[in-house]
Image (cartoon, rainbow, N blue to C red):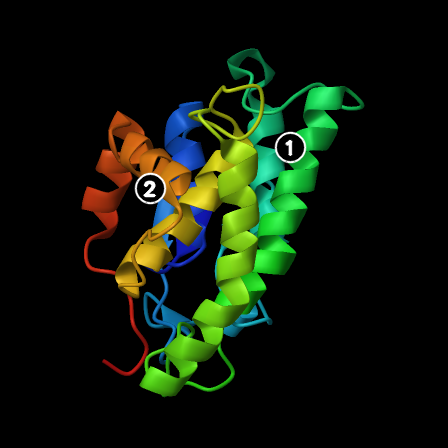
Amino acid sequence: MKLFYASGASSLAVHILLEESSLKYGLEKVNLDTKTWNNSDYNLINSKSYVPALELDNGEILTECAVILEYVAHKVPAQNLIGEYGSTTYWQQRTWLNYIATELHKNFISPFRAGNWLPNTAESKELVYKRVFPRLKFIDKQLGQKEYLVNNRFSVPDTYLFVMTNWLQRLEYGFDDLENLQRFDTNMRKRFTVQNVLQQEGKPHSLQE
């Protein structure tokens, strides 16, 4: 398998899960400014022009972060990264994956920005914070004193949620009134796989730096 990623983007979740899975995979860094990778046209890999994309061993391409996360987790059932299909645990994890994708991920992407997928003007940062805070507060309440989202055990949606808390820090919003999410973020950063991936990816990508 081959992961097409940009440093610090939502592909970070897939990168972490691949490390957790111990599956063999390669990495291809995408330049989101020029839509290229290794001097090739990234749109030929993913015509949506964003990451992540996962090239399977048979050459097929998977896109959409939540879908790729579930695919990877199902490749290693013995590691219990996702519940058995149809189980209560599975549907809880799917619920969180969809909530993060539709209510958090999309709302972090500001239409009022200067060349970046994240808000980078005072006005866009304020707008995005007003949209994401109630959703983050909902997750903070649901998380409570647990370390992880489902059954208090690390699983697929935790990697996706970490991307969101990482963006929260990148944007310097802070964790005011989000103490449970702050603890979650701190605990995730203690995982060897997370540390390894953050070191591999380096400085987060920002369009038109």
Residue 43 spot, x, y in % from top left:
53, 73
Question: Quadrant of the rendered structure where residue 58 is?
Answer: top right
Residue 63 spot, x, y in % from top left:
60, 55
- In this picture, residue 37 sits left or right of residue 52: left
**Residue at the disc numbered 2:** 182
- In this picture, residue 23 sits left or right of residue 100: left
Q: Is residue 57 above or below residue 51?
A: above
Question: Quadrant of the rendered structure where residue 182 is?
Answer: top left
Q: Is residue 38 above or below residue 23?
A: below
The residue shown at (47%, 72%) is 128
Q: Is residue 78 visible?
A: yes
Q: Is residue 57 visible?
A: no
The residue shown at (48%, 77%) is 110
The residue shown at (36%, 79%) is 33
Question: What type is the residue that disc 2 sits on?
Answer: Gln
The residue shown at (51%, 62%) is 132
Q: CA distance from mark 2 to mark 1?
A: 21 Å
**Residue at the disc numbered 1:** 93
Considering depth in this image, is 72 or 131 the residue closer to the camera? 131
Q: Is residue 3 above or below residue 89?
A: below
Label 1, residues with CA under 10 Å away: few <14, some 14-19, many ≥20? many
Res. 133 mark? none
Say which element carries label 1.
helix
Residue 72 spot, x, y in % from top left:
55, 33
Label 2, residues with CA under 10 Å away: few <14, some 14-19, many ≥20? some
**Mark found first going from the N terminus, 2 or 1:** 1
